[in-house]
Amino acid sequence: MKHLLLMALLSYSSGWAQTEYKADAIPASLKENAHSVIRQHETSFTIKAPGEAVRRVHTVVTVLDKEADDDATIVVGYDKLSKVTELEGALYDENGKLIKRLKKSDIEDYSTLSDYNFFDDQRIKAAKFPRQPTYPYTVEFTVETTERNLMFYPTWVPLKKEHVALEQATYSVSIPAGLALRYKEMNIPTAGTVSPSADGGKTYVWKLTNRPALELEPLSPPSWEQLPIVYTAPTDFEVQGYKGKVTSWSDVGRFYYTLNTGRDAIPADLRQRIQELTKNETTTVGKVRKIYSFLQDQTRYVSIQLGIGGWQTIEADKVAASKYGDCKALTNFTQALLKNVGVTAYPALVKAGDNEPDALVDFPSFQFNHIILCVPDGRDTLFLECTSQHGQPGYVGDFTGNRHVLLITPDGGRLVKTPSYRSADNLQQRRISIVLTDQGDATADVRTRYTGLQQDDYGQVIHGMNRDEQRSWLLKRIHVPTFELTGFSFLEQESSVPAVTETLSLAVRKWATPSGNRLFLPLNLMSALSLATPMLQPRQSAVDLGPNYDFEDSDTITYQIPKGYTPEFAIKPVAVDSKFGQYTAQVDVDGDRIKYVRHITMHGGRFPASTYTEWIDFRKKVAKADRMQMVFVKNN
Amino acid sequence: MFPSSLAHCSLATVVLSFCLSFSVSFAQKSKNKAPDPAPVVKFGVIAREEFAKVSTDSTAEALVLYDFGEVTFEENQGEVWLVFTCHSRTKINKKSAYNRATVQISTRRGRSGQHEYVSEFDGYSYNIVDGNVMIDHFPKTAHFSEKVSDDYYLEKYTLPNVREGTIIEYKYTVRTPFSVRYTPRTWTFQQDIPVNWSEYRITIPDYFYYKILQTGYIQMVVNERTVKSVDLYPGQNGASASAYRFAMKDIPAFRDEAYITTEDDYMAKIEFELASYQWVDLRKHDLSVSWTDLDRTLLNDVDFGGQIKRAPFLRETAKTILSQHADTLGRVTAAYEFIRKAIKWDGVGGFVSQEDIKRVFENKKGNAAGINLMLVALLREMDLDANPVILSTRSNGRINESYALIRKFNYVVAQVSVGGKDMLLDATDPFLIPGMLPVHCLNGTGRLVNSSGARFISLMPTEREVDSYTGSFTISDDGEITGTLRQSQVGYSALRARKSFASEGKTKYLEGIRKRRPIWQIEKVDFSGADWNSSAFNTDYTFSIPDACGRAGDRLYLRPMLTEGHGINPFKEPERLYPVDFGYAKEETFIVTYTLPQGYQVEEMPKPVSMTLPENAGRFIYQIGMNAENKLQIMSRIMLRKPMYYAEEYPNVRELFSRIVAKHAEPVILKRGPVAEKK
C-alpha cells in the first residue's frame, strides 16, 4: 500500500509529459459512444480502527467532447465527521503535457445549501479547470479524506453514467486484524481477491479493465443495474462514541433503536388533548386517522440533519413546542402520540425516491435516506409519511411504495414491504360531453377521476398553487389544438388509494373540420397516445416498463353533432391485444348522438429485448386507433 | 477625516426603465393632501380583522399584508454604514407556504475589517385559537447561522407554530459598512405572491449622489421626496438630506411567461447606484455619471481601450488581407474569418479581455472580449473604422439608455462601417454570417465606445429565422405517399441546424430527425450547406408515409400539410402582461405537389386564405389547387415580421395561430371515378 502511494506521489510531482495520459493511447473500442474515458480510477479505503478510516481516490479522465466537460470538475462532500486532507488536480493536453495544476485558490468551499436541508453540517469542496477550447484533454484528481463515521463504508461505482468508458480501475480495502469486511458485488466480471497484509489484517482488491461506454436504449433498465458496483459495509464500527455491530437486519434496526430510544416523552397537556381527540375512536385505523390529521394540522417539515451522523432524532417534547421537525423527529413525535393512545407503531427506514433502486435485501447495512412510520394492524397495516402536509394516511405513492423498508422494533430490525399500486389502483376515468356546431367548434364538459399514482401530481397542484398557477398548469397539460379553458375545479376524495376528480369546461375552436359539405370529426379529444421511439440499431437490453406503466384509462365521449349530418361510413371497433396491455375503442351512432368509448389497460414489467418490435407495433396500432376520425356528410 | 461643512450637492435623479406607460412626478407634500394611504402596522400588535384580509387572488399560498423597508446612513467607528430596517407581515394560507416562515438573510463578509451583519431580529406568529388571538414569540434558539462561502453567510430564523391561517410578523436590521457595500439593497415591490402594501424609504445625506432605477409594469401610489436634516456625524451641524418614499399597493403576484428575456426585466423593483460623493476637501468624486464618462473609463482601461490600439502582431496579417481583397466587404469578411479560424472561444462572455490580446492570439483561445477586441484591433490595422460595441445579453437583462451603468454590461462585439452602414461582428461563433449576431446578443441596444463618435447602436437582427419545405409526392391508391422533400434553412434556423449538425455529427443528427418523425420511412437523406457561406442549410429527404391518407370506400382523405402542420396553438394563455420577445422575425413556407393516384379526382379541398396582422406585422397565406390534370399543389406561408410583439398585439398573434392550426387540419378529399360537378 505504502509503495503504491509513493508511486502515485512520484508520478504526480513530475513535470514531464505523462505519456500514458496521451489521448491517442485509448483503444478505439473505448471511444465508441463515449464522451469521456476513465483512464485510471483507484480507490483505497484503509480502516485504521472501528471508528477511523482513510479514503483515497485517484482518477485520470480523458474528456473527448464538450458533453463531458463536467468531468473536469471535482466535488468532495464532507461534514463534521469527515475531513478532506488532500485535494489535488492537474490538467493535461491531448499529448499528456501538463497545462495546469490546481492551486489552493482554485478550490471553493461552501455549504450544500439544499432547499429542504434547513440546517445541516454538510459542506462541499469543489474545483474545476477552465473550459478547454480543444478536445481531447485529460484531468487528474487525487482526493484523500479521513472518515470518523464508519456506519458506512464506500460503495464503489467507478462508472456512474452512460457514455463513459473505462480503461482500468481498482478498489482496495485494507482492514486490520479483528475487524471483518462484508461486501456485495454487482456486474463485476472477475470476483475480488483477498490477501493477508503484514500487520495481520487483510486486503481486498477488485479490478476492472476495458469497459466500453454504456448507451441506454429507450425504456431500458436503469444504468445502476447494468454498471459494475461493489458495496462494502462494516461489521463492527464506532461513530461519535456509539459502538455498533451489524451482521443482520436485526442488528441494523437495533442500532437505530438504541440511538433513538427514550426520546418519546410528550407534555401532559398534549397527552390530554390527544386522549380527548381520539376518545370516540374504537378502531386503530380511526385513531391513526385522527392523530395523522392532527399532525398535518399542527406541524411542518424543517430539515435538521444533525445528531449522531444525522441518525438521531430530536426529542418529541421539543417538536411539541416548536411544531416542526425533520423526518426522524416527526416520525418519532407521531409514534409518541400513538403510543399515548395505546397504538403501537414502529419507525421504518426506507430508501425513498421515485427513481431509487430497492434496498439490497441480502446485504444488511445502512442503505436508507428517509424514515416513515408503520402501524402494524394485520391486513390493515398502515404506512405514514409524517413529513407530508396533505397526503392520505396509508398512501405511499412511488416515493416510498413498492419496496423493502426496515421496521425498527425493540427486538431489532425486520424487513417488510410497502404497498405497491397495480393497474386497477391507478385509474384515469374520463367522461366528456361535447356539443358540436356545423363550423366544427365544440364546447366540452370534461370530468376525470384520477386515482393512485395517476393522481400524484394533483396534491401539489391543489395545495401548492394559486388559481392562476393551476390554470397555467392545466393549459400546458391539455393537448387540444386551440381552446379556451372556461372553468375548472378539483375535488379530493379520502381513501387509502386517494382519488381526485377534475372538472374542466373547454371551448374548442374547430375541433371538427368542415370541408365543403363534409365534417371531419377526430373522436379522441384528450387521451391520444403517441408513437414509441423507434430503434435504429438492434435492441440489446430488456424492455423495462416501470410502475408508471401500470394504469387503466377509460374515455367515454358523447358528441351532440349538428342537425342534418349523416356519417359517410361506419367505423369498425378496434381491439389491440398484446403482452403490454389491451386496447379497445368503438363508436356507436344514435341519431345525432355519437358515443365513443375507449379503454386501455397497461401492465408494467420487464420484457425480453426481442419484444421491442412488438412494443413499437402495439404503440403504432394504438396511436393509429387514437387518431380515429369520423366523416359526416350534410344531408341535401 | 470628515467634513466640517459641506457644499450642497445635486439631488438624486430617478431614472425610469422601459415601462410602457409610466408617468411619475414627485409630489410635493402639502397640507391639504388626501390622507396617507399606508396602513398603520405596529410591531407585535395585531387586530382580529387582519386575519380576514384577502387579496384579489384568494387562492394564493400566502399574502404579504405589509412589507416595509427603510435605509438610513450612520457613522460608526469612523466608517459610514448603511442601516436597513425591514418590517414584514405575511398571512400563510396554505401548507406549501410554510417555508416562508423561515426567514433567510444573506450577509456579506468584508475582505478585512468590518462585516455586514444582522441585528435585532424579532418575530411573532399569530393564530386564532378558540376565537382568540394566540401569540408565539420567536425563540432565540431557532436562529441558525450558516457559512455559505468565504464571502457570505446566511442567517436563518424559523418562526414557531405556523399553520394554515397563521400571520407571521418579523423585523430586523442589517448594518452594512461602506467598505463592504455602498449600494443599498435592491427593493422588490413585487413578489411571487400578492402584496397588499409595499413601502420603501431611504434618506440620503447630500454627501452622496445616487442614481435610482425603477423597473416594472406597476404604478407607485406614493412617490415623494422631502428635504430633511440629518446628523450623520454627531457633534457637527446637521447636513441636509433627501428623504424618499416609494410605495405600491395591491400588487399582483409576478407571473412568469414564455418568450421573455429574463424575469428581472419585468419585476417591479427599485435599485441604486452610487454615482458620486463629496468629501471634506469639497472635491466631487465621480464614480460614473454620464455615458461619456463611461466611454472614457473604458477607453482608459488597459483591458479594454488598451487592447484596441494598434496591434503590431497583426500587422502582417492586415497587409496580406489588404493585398488579397480590393473591396471593404471582402476585407472585413477575410479579417472576420481570420480571427474565427485563429482563436477559439472559451465559452465565457465579458467586455474586458482577461489577458492581453497578444497572449490570446498565442494561446489560440479567449473570452468574447479577447476575441472581439482583437478583431477591432485587426480591422484598425487595416485602416478601417472599427469600434467595440458593449452590450448586455438577453439573460442578463436590458440596458437603460438614460443611465450609464457599467455593471449592466457583460459582452462586447465589433462594429465596422461598410459602405456607410454599420456591420456588427461576433467572432466567437464559426457559424455566423458576417453581420449576424448570435441570439443571446439580440437585446435592444448596445453602446459603441469611441473617444469621438460614441453612440447607441441598435442590436436588431439583420437575419430572420427562415424555414422552407418544397417537395413532390405521389399518392398510391392505398393511401401511401412517396416522394422527396427539401428542407431549406436560412438565418437563425440555419445557424441552429449547422451548430447541431457540427457538434452531433451526421449519424446522430439523422437519428434525431428519425426520432422526431417516427412515421417517416426515410430511404435517403443528403445534407448540404453546412458552412456559413452557403446560402442555406439544406436537407433533402426521400421518404414514404404508409397510411398518410385515411381510406373509406372510393375516397381518400389527405392532410396536405403532412407532419409539418401546426397541430397546437403555442399561445395558450388568453392574455399577456409583457411583450412576446422572439428575438428575430420568422418565416415558414411549405410548398408541396401531390400526384394523385390513377383514376382519382379532388372532390373537396380547403379554401385558400390570406390574412394579415395590423400594420402588416404578420401574415398567413394558404393556397391550394390543381396545376395539371393530376397534380395538386399546396402552399402555406407564415410570416412574423417583428422580433417583438407588445402585449396589446398578443391577442392578434394568438388569433392568427388559432386560424393557422385550424387551416392546417383541413383535409383534401380524393374520390375514385367521376366527381359531381360543383354548382
Image: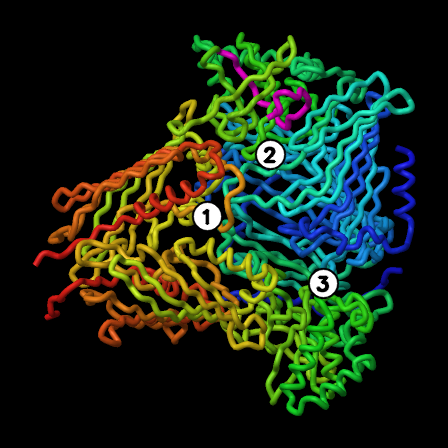
Percent coordinates x, y for residue A222 in the rendering: 57, 37
- Identified at 50% across, 72% down, the residue is B490
Total residue callouts: 3
Which mark sits nearer the N-terminus, 2 or 1?
A: 2
Residue beneath the point at 56% across and 62% down: B506
Compared to residue B129, the image places residue A448 above or below, namely below
Q: Which residues are magenta?
A: A359-377
Task: Give the residue at mark 2.
Answer: A225
Which image quarter holds the N terminus of chain A? top right
The answer for how far apart the CA atoms under marks 3 and 2 are is 37 Å
Q: Is residue A372 magenta?
A: yes
Q: Nearer the viewer, residue B183 or A92?
A: A92
Image position of B174 (left or right of B126): right
Q: Quadrant of residue A252?
A: top right
On residue A533, the disc is: 1
With A29 as the anchor, is A618 left or right in this view? Answer: left
Q: Which residue is mark 3?
A: B346
Q: Amino acid at mark 2?
A: Glu
Q: Magenta-highlighted stretch: main secondary structure?
A: loop
What's the distance in space between the residues labelled 1 and 3, CA to CA? 35 Å
Q: For residue B588, say whether it is visible.
A: no
Q: Would residue B238 be found to the left or right of residue B130 on screen? A: right
Residue A140 percent across, percent down from the top left = 80, 48
Disc 3 chain ID: B
CB under 8 Å between callouts 2 and 1?
Answer: no
Contact (Cβ within 8 Å) of mark 3 with mark 2:
no
